[in-house]
Amino acid sequence: MNDDRLRLDLADLADEVSPVDLRDRALRTSRRLGVQRAVATSAAAVVMLGAATGTAFALMPRDGGPAPMPATTPSTTLAPSPSAVTPTTTASPEATVTSEPAGPAATIGRVFYGPKPGGQGADPARLWSFRPGSVPVRLIPVPRIAAIGNAVVSPDGERVAWVDESSYLRVANVDGTGERTYRTSLVDPDCWTPSWAPDSQRVTVSRVVSAEPSMVTEVGVVEVSTGKFTRIGDLRGCHPLWSADGKVLAFPDGSTGRVMLTDESGRKQRSIPNVGGNADDSCLDVASLSPDGSRIALRLRGPDEDSGDVARELDVNAVLDTRTGRKLDLELGGRKLLQAYFQADGTLVARVGAGDHNVLVLLNGDGRKISETPEPTSLKGQQILGVAD
């Protein structure tokens, strides 16, 4: 890698960490509040259609044509997209890993980043990945509003799914190749955002069944190889999370501040104690669920805090036991928790502030520190989208 290439890559990443653009923030807030009002007025009208028979989404190559309305007769045409970009490493300084003898084989996997809400920068926005001991890798460009609001990386770290500006689901390899668009049905880009199933082969979405006279949607999973849609239950809320064992789906209810947990049938729903309803703390933003669904990383808001809206936020200020609502004590050395993601082995990757850079702290199931590694300073202005083992 020559010096010119490294300087260009650093310039690309610098575009993603520019100062706050107040106009962009104002426009986004207006849109998000509109979505919140739409959800509040239409949630009671949600109708589930029939039994869980498969409906196919049409898969189309990426193009610039007009966005059609939902098709009346589903298509099963599959056409792969051409390659978009090739991943390139940046010149960001390597991170130094420091370990403590508490968990012999536990390590931090591949961490994926995108732009933070409220910042300005290139559109489309570049996604990045970082593995401790290496340097950031430049990945696929995604429309900025999708990168902030709904883009999600598969558990195996191979693909990214997002909802485009026409409200169609798109899936591509993280290097930008193999992009496909699922065009039969519109899907929710703001509240029930895409979530990968643990097998990295299916994406949970909320598709629009009809838009008039009121919004009617249904939740289900799309098989990314075929476009087949299968309804999974009468679920209503925002920002679903799967447990790695595939047995638990968690999501905020989007109205009372409760966080619900259920199986994919939706018949055994329960809420986390002491969150939402009449409790002091409420939650509309969740980030990560432990492999067995027993713990969750989320943003709690107190009684005097603005509750925000339905759009996705990935900041975290607590990790809770989902059965008791008790906060897990995390060994972070007094540093502020910024984000947190569970790995498939049950360990937790916590992001904390440390001056001009952030630090990734690996914790065991009891919240005790195993190791930590500083992030490159070039990633400070980015937010983590997920961690793949």
Image: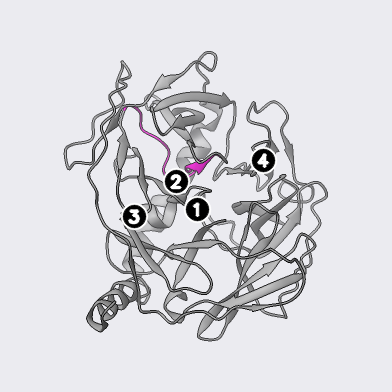
Local packing at callout 1 (Cα closer than 10 Å; few below 14, some 14-19, many 20+) is: many
Residue where numbered disc 3 is placed: 175
Comparing marks 2 and 4, which lies closer to the viewer? Answer: 4
Residue where numbered disc 1 is placed: 312
Residue where numbered disc 2 is placed: 190
Three-letter code, disc 1 = Arg
Which percent across, then down, holds residue 32? Answer: 43, 51
Query: Where is 366 relative to 218, above or below?
Result: below
Which structural element holds mark 2?
Answer: loop
Compare marks 4 and 3 and give the one earlier in the sequence. 3
Query: Where is 52 relative to 373, above or below?
Result: above
Q: Find residue 60 and name its label.
A: none
* Spatial CA span between label 4 and label 3: 27 Å
Q: Residue at x 73, y 72 (%)?
A: 369
Instruction: Please provide the residue range marked out in magenta.
Output: 184-197
Residue 381 shown in magenta: no
Query: Where is 140 relative to 108, above or below?
Result: above
Magenta highlight: main SS = loop
